[in-house]
Every structure is written in C-alpha cells, then in structure tokens.
Amino acid sequence: MKKHFHNKYIQHQAKLDTFIEDFDTSGKLLSHGKRNSLKLFKLDAETVNIKSFKIPNIFNKIAYKFLRKSKAQRSFEYAENLLSLGIGTPHPIAYYEFYNGLFFGKSYYISEHVYSDLTYRELTKDLHYPDHENILRAFTRFTFKLHENHVYFLDHSPGNTLIKKENDGYRFYLVDLNRMQFKPLSFEERIQNFERLTIHESMVKVMSEEYAKLINRPFEEVFNLMWKFTQDFQRKFHRKRELKNQLKFWKK
C-alpha cells in the first residue's frame, strides 16, 4: 500500500486509515457508478469526500504500477496545483493506492466536501434558473481564468463544476480532476474546451459573447468556432452511443 497526506491532515492519519479500511461498510453514499463511488465521512467537525476508483483493466494495472501516476495521485497533485493558482477546488487531504504483487489495485482520493448550491448542469436543464445569465457569464470568466493560468481541464463537463452563491457573486470549484493538462493553450484549444458543456445554442451565444470580450476577439469568430466544436462533439457522442447500443444488441 502507498498513501500520501497533505501536511494539514497528517495528524488525522489513523482516522483516515479507518475510513479507507471500512469504506465498503461505512460512510454516507453520495454516488455509485460503474466506474467510481463517492462517500462522505465525518472527520471531527469537517465532512470529507472519499472517491473510490474501480480496479483498472489489466493494461492499466501494469501502467499505474510502473509507468503512470494513478487517478488518485493525479487528483491530489492537480488539486494542489489549482489551489496554488487561486483556482477553486475542494482541498486535497490524501490518496491511497493498493497493490497485489506486480499489479495495481484499488485507489482512493480524499478531499474536503464542498456543499454547493448547484452545478453547471442545473443551468443546462433549466434555462430560466434564477440569475441564469449572470451565473453563465461568471462561469465563462472562471473558465477564462483557467486558460490564462495554463489549465486545460479535459473533463470540463456539466457535472464537474460546483457553484456556490456568495454575497459578491459566485464561486466555482472543479471536481473530478484526474484528466488535466498544464500548458499554454491555443485559441482553438481554449474554445474547444467549451464543447462538452451544453447543447443549447442560447447558452453558447452567452458564453461566446463573454469570452470574446475577455480574449479581445470578435464575437462572431468565437461563437462560430464554439458552436462548431459543440455540434461536432454531440455528433461524435451520439455516434459512439449508437455503436455501443448495437454491440449490446449483438451480444444478446
């Protein structure tokens, strides 16, 4: 087993060890998917969020042991990077990795739990959500801040930005961090980073207008490219889903 703690939480190591040991039988289930599970645990007065990553396939069992950092380790390190840049994300606490001989097994990422008012997804489901346009513009400014700080969030999708309402506006927190690059971004990469966020042309227009002002480019140029990337992504997404459904049919 390998484990690593943020300096702020080293004194809680024994308690965190217990959370990991008893993960399957304790804690409050937040979500359970095919790939990962999320649970909440109480650490004194604080609520912590533990993400359990599924055991990887045989190729990644070897890769994560010898060649690549695990999703848990990347999540922890990327969270530290984001916070150092002044970008919101739940504070990293620890990560754990388990091995079975030569093979990588289970891994866990522990962070503080942020209680949010909404995620970006609510904006896509309810176009009349209170203060919809102002939140969307603030989110676009947040994304611009990512790009200006050379952060390319590859999973920039509706469920991966938590939003908290505050007196002076809105605060944003990135979650699901394990796919991220830190590099200068081209104009095309910046705009393509919006492709997963919505199917609504009206939302793309608002984000394009706000981003065009920030990057000092014509609205038409930004919108045309953002809408193209959005449509291309949707076509690829639906084509992929159709292929999966066809494969499931033939397996029956």
Image (cartoon, helix red, strand yellow):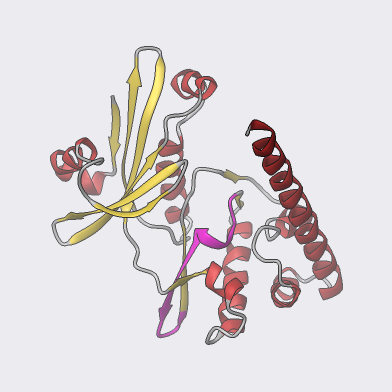
Count of all numbered marks drawn on residues in the image: 0
Task: Tell me if residue 166 comes above or below residue 156 in the rendering.
Answer: below
Using the image, determine if residue 96 lies above or below residue 38: above
Q: Position of residue 24 (x, y in %)?
A: 25, 40
Q: Look at the image and tell me in which quarter the C terminus lies.
A: top right
As drawn, the residue found furthest toward the front would be: 252
Q: Nearer the viewer, residue 70 or 129?
A: 129
204 relative to 251 in the view: left or right: right
| Residue at x 77%, y 63% (from the top left corner) | 226
Q: Tell me which residue sits at (67%, 38%) in the image.
A: 249
x, y (%) of residue 166? Answer: 40, 80
181 relative to 91, above or below: above
- Image: 168 above or below 241: below
Q: Is residue 167 magenta?
A: yes
Q: Does 50 appear in magenta?
A: no
Instruction: Report the residue at 29% width, 32% height from top.
Output: 3
Quadrant in the picture for residue 228: bottom right
At which x and y percent is residue 49?
A: 31, 53
> Over which residues does the magenta segment extend?
155-169
Can you name the residue that lies furthest to the top here?
101
Return the x and y of residue 58 as percentages of the image width and height: 50, 20
**Relative to the observer, which residue lies in front, 214 or 193?**
193
**Quadrant in which the N terminus appears:** top left
Drawn side of residue 53 relative to residue 242, left or right: left
Is residue 92 found left or right of 13 in the rendered image? Answer: right
